[in-house]
Image: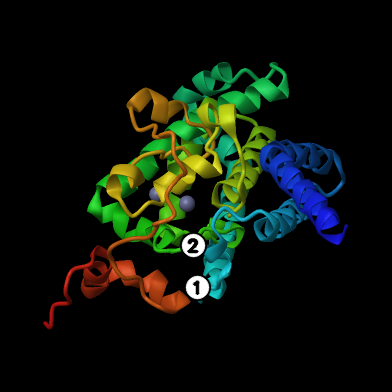
């Protein structure tokens, strides 16, 4: 009897895991956006958004323990403090970018007088918000795609982006592990076109929300089944290939939110097998937080990042 009951319980557990595998991606992404909708309608939109974001991180943290994609990635890699440090440094930068977004249109109107008419004429401000956000996501993705692809293909930029790829495990906490210079480049490339088109501040908020929820999803170590979503959004499955040590897999799937530019420019990669767990880089990243920030600015630091032997003089 006991053995029978145990078998039933374990079968039930299997079904629950499978259902969670299919539901977790849409639940966290669309649930996060629904939370963002209420946060933006509240008296404290930013506090509300941070609350929803924290809840999503917590849910993913639990799911990582219940249905991990790779059990070995649950072990600490000694980088958690650095991961959080880089996340906070980058988040501070995003906040500054948000402030600039608030005042930039005014400056643009004053300083770039000849362009002002063009600016106000181009953005479809009277369209429903959902269409405006969809346009913003695709326009921003063009900048995200190329800044990301350049960061992989040009050594000058790789020295900053390597920090993000140096991790040997993916989990929700190392989503924001970016060198500040890498983030700055990415934000400029993705947001300046939107300023120039005259996108309103609210659209930037929504773009920020989409990017935030997509980011924690692409890095989470949860065995999610994303099926058709793989052809529209940057899913955990696609992003794991991007972190592969094998560059035939790693120099693919540059999309941060949507994959439209990967599909158009021939870097979409999604073969019919489980995505890679052999992730990381060939070079060596410095140990401490400040050392990691400084490393791309010194000659020997760059040689370490590239996996070349140090020069003595
Ligand atoms: Zn990358
Ligand atoms: Zn990543």
Left or right: 179 with respect to 158? right
Left or right: 4 with respect to 234? right
Q: Which mark is residue 15?
A: none
- How far apart are the alpha carbons under marks 2 and 1? 8 Å
Vertical comparison of 305 with 205: above or below: below
Q: Residue at the spot x=44%, y=34% of the render?
A: 272
Q: Which mark is residue 77?
A: 1
Which of the two residues, 218 or 114, is positioned nearer the viewer here?
218
Left or right: 304 with respect to 97? left
Left or right: 68 with respect to 185? right
Q: Residue at the spot x=44%, y=39% of the render?
A: 273
Q: Residue at the spot x=36%, y=72% of the render?
A: 294
Q: Which mark is residue 169?
A: 2
Circle 2 SS class? loop
Q: Tag 1: Cα neighbours inside 10 Å, few (<14), some, or many (≥20)?
A: few
Label 2–label 1 contact, CB within 8 A: yes
Q: Which coloring applies here?
A: rainbow
Coordinates of residue 126 in the picture (x, y in percent): 70, 16
């Amino acid at each position: 009897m006991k053995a029978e009951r145990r078998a039933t319980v374990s079968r039930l557990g299997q079904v629950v895991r499978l259902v969670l595998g299919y539901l977790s991606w849409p639940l966290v992404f669309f649930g996060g956006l629904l939370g963002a909708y209420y946060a933006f309608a509240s008296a404290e939109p930013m506090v509300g958004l941070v609350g929803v974001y924290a809840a999503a991180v917590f849910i993913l943290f639990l799911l990582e323990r219940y249905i991990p994609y790779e059990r070995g990635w649950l072990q600490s890699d000694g980088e958690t403090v650095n991961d959080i440090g880089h996340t906070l440094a980058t988040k501070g930068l995003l906040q500054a970018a948000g402030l600039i977004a608030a005042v930039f249109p005014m400056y643009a109107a004053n300083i770039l007088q000849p362009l002002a008419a063009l600016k106000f004429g181009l953005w479809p401000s009277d369209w429903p918000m959902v269409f405006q956000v969809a346009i913003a996501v695709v326009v921003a993705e063009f900048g995200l795609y190329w800044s990301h692809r350049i960061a992989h293909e040009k050594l000058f930029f790789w020295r900053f982006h390597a920090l993000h790829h140096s991790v040997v495990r993916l989990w929700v906490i190392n989503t924001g592990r970016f060198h500040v210079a890498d983030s700055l480049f990415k934000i400029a490339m993705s947001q300046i076109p939107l300023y120039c088109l005259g996108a309103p501040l609210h659209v930037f908020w929504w773009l920020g929300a989409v990017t935030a929820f997509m980011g924690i999803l692409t890095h989470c170590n949860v065995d999610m089944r994303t099926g058709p979503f793989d052809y529209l959004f940057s899913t955990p499955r696609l992003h794991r290939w991007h972190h592969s040590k094998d560059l035939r897999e790693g120099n693919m799937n540059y999309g941060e939110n949507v994959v439209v530019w990967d599909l158009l420019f021939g870097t979409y990669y999604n073969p019919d097998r489980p995505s890679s767990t052999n992730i990381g880089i060939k070079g060596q990243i410095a140990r401490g937080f400040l050392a990691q920030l400084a490393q791309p600015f010194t000659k020997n630091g760059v040689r370490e990042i590239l996996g070349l032997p140090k020069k003595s003089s």
